Every structure is written in C-alpha cells, then in structure tokens.
Amino acid sequence: MQPQIPALRDLVLIGGGHSHVQVLKAFAMKPVPGVRITLISESALSPYSGMLPGYIAGAYSEKDINIALGPLCVLAKARLICARVTGLDPQQNTIQLADRPSLRFDILSLNCGAEQAPVTGQGIRVKPLNKFIPKWAEIKQGIQAQSNYVSSIAIIGAGAGGAELALAFRASLPAATEIHLVGPNLLPGHGGGAVKKLKQTLAQKKINYVRDRLATEEANTTDDSVNLKLQSASQSIRADHVFWVTDVRAPQWLNATGIAQDERGFLRVDDRLRTLSHPHIFAAGDVAHLVDQERPKAGVYAVRAGPILAKNLALAIQGLSLAGPSSQFRPQRYHLNLIGCGDNTAIASWGPLATRGRVWWQLKQWIDEKFMRRFNNLPTMQAPVHKLPSALAADLPDDLMRCGGCGAKLAADPLRRVLARLPAQSSVNLKLGIGDDAAEVINTGATTLATVDGFRSMVSDPYLFGRIAAHHSLNDIFAMAAKPTAALAFVTVPLMAEAMMEDELFQLMSGLVDVLNAHDVVLAGGHSAEGAELNLGLTVLGASAGEISTKAAAQIGHGVILTKPLGTGVVLAGDMRGQVDSKLSSACMASMDQSNWPSIAVLVAHEVGALTDVTGFGLAGHLGEILRGAGCGVKLRLANIPILPGAEDLVRQGIASSLQKANALVLQDYKFIDIDHDNPRLQLLVDPQTSGGMLATLPQERIADCLTELNNLGYQAVQIGEICDSSIMEIH
C-alpha cells in the first residue's frame, strides 16, 4: 500500500479577502502534496465589497454578498481558525492571536484588507465590512420605524465608494430622508464624464453633494443628532448618522513587524507579490503596496491578483523558483468602472468616457454574481493521487510505515518543549504530576469520582478542539453535582514534519489547559502518540462537594429542564461536508465552548433531582436513562425544546450524524401525540451532542426561578416536560 504523504510545510493565509478565496479554490482544485493550509480570519464570512451597495439598496440579501469560508476550507482541506491577529514575528515565523497561543508558519500570505483611518466624533466606519453590515441593518430598522421623523444621513468621502453608498441609501430609506455626501472632490481619479454623470444622478435623487471637508462634529443638545461643521463654509449639516468612506490605512499590528512598508503602513511587495524584506511573506489586495505599480485601493486588483498569488504560493511552499513572466503580477492601468445607482441602472466609465443605463447594472450584476458562484457553489472533489515534489522530500520522516505500541509515542524533545510552554500545573490536590510515571492525587473528599471520555477532532482548529474536548469531559463530573480536581490526557497527533507536530500538540494542549485551569482543574499528566487523526482523551477525577446527584433521583411531578439547545451532531456532520451556514457553525461552536459549571450551583440551589449531561445518546437516550433509573415516565413537549437555529433545515436536507440512526431506536418507547412522524425535531431528539447541556428534573415550584437565574447566566434554559408515572411515555 502506498503510504499517504504527511504534512511537511505550513502555508498560512491571514484574511479571507478576494485574493485568498481564489488561493483556497486553486489549492482545492490542484493540491500540493505535503502542504497544510491554514486560513486565519476574524469571521467565517467574507463580504464581497462590490456587492455591498446592492445589498444596501435591497438587490441582494446578506447571504448573497458573503463568501462562506467554512465550506471553502473544507473543499481545500484547510484549517479555519476564527481569531483576531495582534502581531507577527517574521524571524520566528509566528503569528500572535488574541486570547489564544501563537501559530507558526513556513510561508505566509496576507490578504486582510485595510481599515478606515481614525475618524472624528462618533461616525461609523464602512470598513471593515463585516462590522459595518450588522450596524447598518440596525440603523435601517430604526429609521424605518420613525414614521413621523425625517432622518438625516451624512457620508464623509465622495469617492466612488461614498457616492455609491449614498445612492444605495436613497434606494432603501424613506423618500423624505435627507442624504448629504461630503468631500472636497467628487470621484477623484475618475474622468470628467463620470463626474458629470454622477452629479446629474445625485441631483435627480435629491442627494446633497457638499464640496468641502469636515472640520468638527458637535453633539446637539435637543436630540441624538450631531452638527457637522465644514472647513470652508459657515454652514453646518445636521446628521443623525454619519458614515465614513475616506482614506484607509494598514492594520496597525503590522507596524511592529519589521516588514517593509510604505508611509501608510501597507506592505511593500514586488511583482511576485512577495514582501521586499521577507521573501517568505506575500501580500495582496488593499494591505499591499505594489512597488512601481501603485494602484487605487479597489477590490478589482485583489481579484486580479488571486490567480498569480495562488501560483506563486504553490511554488514558494515547495521551494521552487518564482522566476519567469508567468509569476509576475501586472495590474492593468485602466479598468471599466461601474457605479450602481440603486435603481437598476449603473454609471459605466472608461477614462474620460461615461454613460448610464440598465445594461451596465445588468453587466455589474453578472460580473459580481459570477464571481460569488465560484466560491459558494462548490464542486465535490475526488481524492487525488500525488507525487511528492523533490524539494519537500528531504523533510519526510525516515519511515512512513509507522510503529504501533510504544513506538507510536511522540518523540521526547518536542513533547518536552510543548510541556515547557504550557502554564505550570500545581494544585493542593496534586502531590506528583507531569514528569513522574503516575500522578499522585490527594483525596480531599469522602469519595473520589472518576470518568473518561474523548474523541477525534470535530473541528479543524486544534486550540478550539482542545477547549471543546475539555468542556465535554468535565461535564460527567458536573453531572454528579461534583467538582473536578485533576485530569490525565491521552493525545494522538497525526504524522507530520516534527515542527508541525509540535505546534499541533501545543495548540491542542493550550486549549485544553486554558479550560481546565479556568475550572481549577490541574493537568496531572498523560500520554501522547502518533495516529491517523488528531484525538484527545481525558480521564477526569473529581470530589463531591456535598450530596452526589444521580440519574435515579427524578420524582413524579418534577419538571424537566434543558440548559443548551440541541443540534451539535447534525451541524458537525454538515460542517464536515461543507454544507453549513457560517452563522450556524459559529453558534454551534459557541454552544460547545460554553461551560456547564455555573449552571450546577443554580440547579443544586433549586433542589435538583435527577441530573445528567446530554452527549452521544442524544436527549431522548439520556432522558431514558433518567426514567429507567427512577421508574418513571414523561410528557415531553417537542415544541419547547431549544434547537440551534438552522439545525432543522439540515435535517430536512437529509444530513445526519453517523450515530443518529442507532440512537433513533429509543423513539419506539414513546407515543406521539399530535406529532408528525416527519417532524425534524424528532430526529434532533436523538441527535448525538458534543459538550451538550445539562438535563435535570426539579420540583415544579422551583422551575421558574431556576430558569430565570440560568438564563441570566447566558444559558438557553427551557422547561421541556414533566415527569409522570411509568405508564406514560409521550411526546406532544
């Protein structure tokens, strides 16, 4: 059997911009063996700037203008890490991230866009778009709700972006809304024909163009609006909302990196899109300054740079030469400018020529929608057969046919380095820990609880996987109303280049330790090994804080409550196939990364009866354990059960976890009362949960206060039924 080539180099992409989505698609279509790709993005959605005015004008939905990065990464077999970059060390080849450990790279590319320069007053910056879009939706709703009030809007910046935004606002807001466009020049950099056409259109749409600069902004004393003072005139403009579409600057965290930059902080790159100072770091789009080829900060250049960037990254990661004209990026000096007017027409300009009409809007729609289809309508890929490039062969491990048994352990040096980088583990309960043959834990209670759990990674981000696995494993101790004290870890890391295995282990262990230590749980030791996939198993020890809760303590008349929504199983199954909406995926990850520990004190204080956590057997399966233990029945209210938004749609699409079919057998024990057998919520009753919520029974009179306290803590806690005598097993 031909051994699979392990990952030998890390190609890391910062930002999900117009160039990087093309890089991901290119690597998906033509993978480079031995290369692992990681995309770092603050959001799992990448808004397409060219369609923003159309979205504001009502021509597109929010979904239409966003590229879903999750499915694209699945197609490219790339890791997606949703995190904020705070720094970069080009000598150590590490990327600093907010609230999590640094990440290493071999080759790095930046396509993270630009940010609006500092603004005066309380104006709203249009860039970055993923922060502007939700703010705009809120503002629009507020303006439309004020039927007896004439709102006033000011857009600062009269370039193409500001002008198109003003026209889009006019199309989407009440006709009486006052719209002011402020800037010293209209359409700077465009020909006279385009300026003339735009002036005519602004006048037709009753948009007030003010040829001036903003001097100061003063708050009104009578309402929530502001007075905008202009530099060259005594007049002022009253505005309820101010939007800035002015000059942009590079992300400020780049300043301390030492990478060659221009006067505004943008990375200086050559015609191969390599930074001038660090040839293993590339950049494209707004964050890049093309030396001797400077162009405006416009999305069209990031789109055009994408294919060249993908080609050059593929060469660079293999150690191959970028010489030759095919690796050069030569952006065109002129391109067709299309400015949407918000009324199914657009202004088209090329140099001094300009015209306006419906055909240009139709052309703009065709171009934009064609671009989006490339990344949101993804093909199904077949597994390719690779031949390893010779430049990477030197980093292959000596023997790809790996040993089993103790020969499968990770090497001592990288393991020692990872442990040295983690926080020191100490506790009053720990006498001997990491470094000894076995942990010695001091028993501080009348009894010691022990549990073991674990699974292979369900997400591509190893740090997040470590956190979720820790929460999941601690839940078995929480379900006994007990306090976890210590844990032992068993980690399996896939075969890669040694530096990559070390970093993978460090990311995983950092997520694990962050959650354990946040719960005052000490990592007492563990074991590591090579394997086919990233796996984490945890043995957790705990001590009773009082009376231990069990599944058998339910009583007739108790109410049944659930603290988290269902659906993680079907969402993870869909995520693996690249079929899950980014918002649903994010909601699922947030639910799994939420600790159940704060809920335990509330449940105990309200006289909890039976208590368990919802995991692999699904809600119905774990509820069945409670009912069998107590010899009771239940009336379950299907409509009350909290569900992750969008999970029911996945069920209707035929997506299911591999364990769901076996779990569904438990539904034979229930009688359906006025419930359609095709109701997707029935499948979600047996959907296997990872790091699910707590399932508890309480005296009915304590339910309302308990739910109030739980919801104040951030849980989606709901009463879902009542415990009855054993003759009743109903789903209503």
Image (spheres, helix red, strand yellow):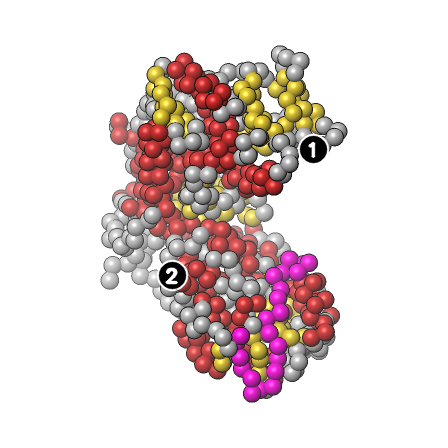
Q: Nearer the viewer, mark 2 or mark 1?
A: 1
Residue drawn 69% across and 33% down?
A: 224
Residue drawn 62% across and 64% down?
A: 717
Q: Vertically, is 693 above or below 585? A: below
Q: Give the extent of the magenta segment.
A: 711-732
Neighbor class of circle 2 (other Cα within 10 Å; few <14, some 14-19, many 20+) is: few
Q: Is residue 370 left or right of residue 443?
A: left
- Which residue is at the far front? 148
Residue drawn 57% across and 30% down?
A: 176
Q: Quadrant of residue 333?
A: top left
Q: How many badges with numbers are in the image?
A: 2
Mark drawn on residue 430:
none
Q: Check disc 2 and report the residue beneath it.
A: 653
Neighbor class of circle 1 (other Cα within 10 Å; few <14, some 14-19, many 20+) is: few
- Which residue is at the far top? 232
Taking the magenta stretch, the answer to whether it contains residue 9 is no
Label 2 – label 1 distance at C-alpha:
47 Å
Relative to the observer, which residue lies in front, 50 or 618? 50
What's the amino acid at mark 1? Asp
Q: Could you say where residue 290 lies in the image, as x and y percent from the top left?
A: 40, 24
Query: Which of pointers 2 and 1 lies earlier in the amino acid sequence?
Result: 1
What's the amino acid at mark 2? Gln
- Which corner quadrant holds the N terminus? bottom left
Q: Check disc 1 and report the residue beneath it.
A: 224
Tag 2 near tag 1, CB within 8 Å: no
Q: Quadrant of residue 281?
A: top left
Relative to the observer, which residue lies in front, 357 or 618? 357
Q: Vertically, is 46 above or below 247? A: below
